[in-house]
Amino acid sequence: MSSSQSARPFRRRVFYIPGFDPYPARRYRELYRKEGREQAQLSGYTLEMRARIGTEGYAWNVVTQTQGTRAHTRYDILVWNDLVRDGMAMSIPGTYARLVQVAWLYVSSGAFRRLMMLRKGPVIAALYPIVVLVLQLLIALAAAWSVSRAVSAVTFPGAGLIVGLPLLVFLMRWFKARDRWLFAYYLMQDYAFTAQRSGANPPELDSRIEDFKQRILAALGTDVDEVLVVGHSSGAHLAINILADLSRDQLIPLRGPKLAFLSLGQVVPMVSFLPRAYKLRADLHHLSQQDHLFWLDVSAPGDGCSFALCDPVSVSGVAPDNKKWPLVISAAFSQTLSPQKWKALRRRYFRLHFQYLCAFDQPADYDYFQITAGPMTLQQRFTGRKPSASRIDVPASPHTAMHI
């Protein structure tokens, strides 16, 4: 081997799929810049982010040096926040109609009870917007009724209605305008987006998934060492759809880059437990037995918005006899964050759902920036790692059919 060959840096393509998030991709770039710099300083390596590149999508380059070994990474965000914004552009009455639809679907299908058996945290998070929105409606109705009665008592009966209805509308709009702090409308639209077709993807999402698939397929045809797909939160089940399609269609080159999948803070059971989630369950079944990828699933009990340590294949009831994936491990926030940082974050539930993308001041083997920009493949880094002893792998879904 020549000196030029031995000096060749490790090369990687990363495709990050966000969850149900209306914010633009630059939010993730700035998070990566800030937290990556902090993690590199804490762990003793260098990390340099370079300017955004290309015109397709949203991407940047990262260069790291770890113990004298360099790595070059192109990091792409697979953007679907426009679909999220479209899904959130719903009237107040429409939101309440969706609330009833979602609640009825999860209760009548048996999914709600089975999800509660797994993890109460994410189910409580799902109940939160329902409780808040119903409470807002009751407060607005009570205020409008009280004012209406008072006005009618001192004027004439119809006057109360003339004043009460505008007040009701005003209060409901006032509540919605403050959702940036409460997240009730946001979370309701998140669950409604999934539930609108009882677990099947809406056509516009399937179209976007096809675009993502073509971009990942193109990267698999390059001379990089690894193609790493990261699915965060509800982005995890999009990644499962993509990778299962590529595998099923035999599009993954046997002699190409190593293919790896990292699912973070996944909420797969919220979808796979629904009656018409046939494709997702089939994709879980297929992907879990493939030799041509490495699948690591990372979560933490401290993240109340994820199904922490729940094996998404097994709990969905579709694990084959020769199941290989995923390797389920814990990010163990209470151990990998210092007592001071853990104390500051432990009640910030939405922030903790993003901790997987952030720096740990007492890191163990999970370091997001070494995984996405360091000089080792995901498989090299975690080969031999035992799954977390506290993982949940008992079949729990009320629906296990993988085809209509």
Image (spheres, rainbow, N blue to C red):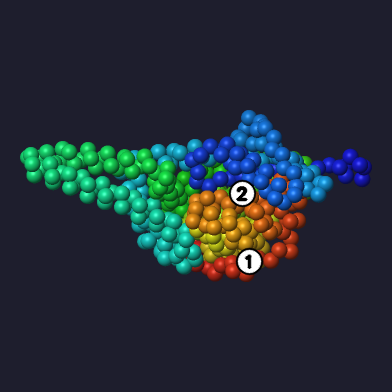
Q: Crowding at label 2, few (<14), some or many (≥20) Cα neighbours within 10 Å?
A: many
Q: Is residue 123 left or right of residue 164?
A: right
As rendered, which of 259 and 319 lies closer to the eye? 259
Element at label 1: loop
| Residue 365 x/y as whole percent | 70, 58
Question: Which residue is drawn at the image coordinates 61% and 49% (left, top)?
Answer: 358
| Residue sitting at the far right | 2
Number of numbered tags placed on the structure image = 2
Residue 387 is situated, as x and y percent measured from the top left of the image, at: 65, 65
- In the rendered structure, the answer to whether residue 165 lies left or right of residue 328 reads left
- Image point 54% across, 58% down: which residue? 343
Question: Residue 336, position in %: x, y?
Answer: 63, 59
Label 1 vs 2, first from the N-terminus: 2
Whole-percent x, y for residue 351 in the image: 52, 50
Q: Residue at x 46, y 53 (%)?
A: 199
**Disc 1 to disc 2, how far (Cα)?**
21 Å
Looking at the image, is 269 positioned above or below residue 16?
below
Point out the image quarter for the N terminus. top right
- As drawn, the residue found furthest toward the top would be 55
Tell which of 358 and 320 is nearer to you: 358
* Label 1: few (<14), some (14–19) or many (≥20) C-alpha neighbours in 10 Å: some
Which labelled disc corresponds to residue 388?
1
Residue underneath mark 2 = 358
To which quarter of the image does residue 380 belong? bottom right
Q: Secondary structure at mark 2?
A: loop
Q: Please, what is the three-letter code of the amino acid marked with disc 1?
A: Ser
Do tag 1 and tag 2 residues touch (Cβ < 8 Å)?
Answer: no
Which residue is pictured at 62% across the width and 69% down the height? 389
Mark 1 against mark 2, which lies toward the viewer? 2
- The three-letter amino acid code for the residue at tag 2 is Cys
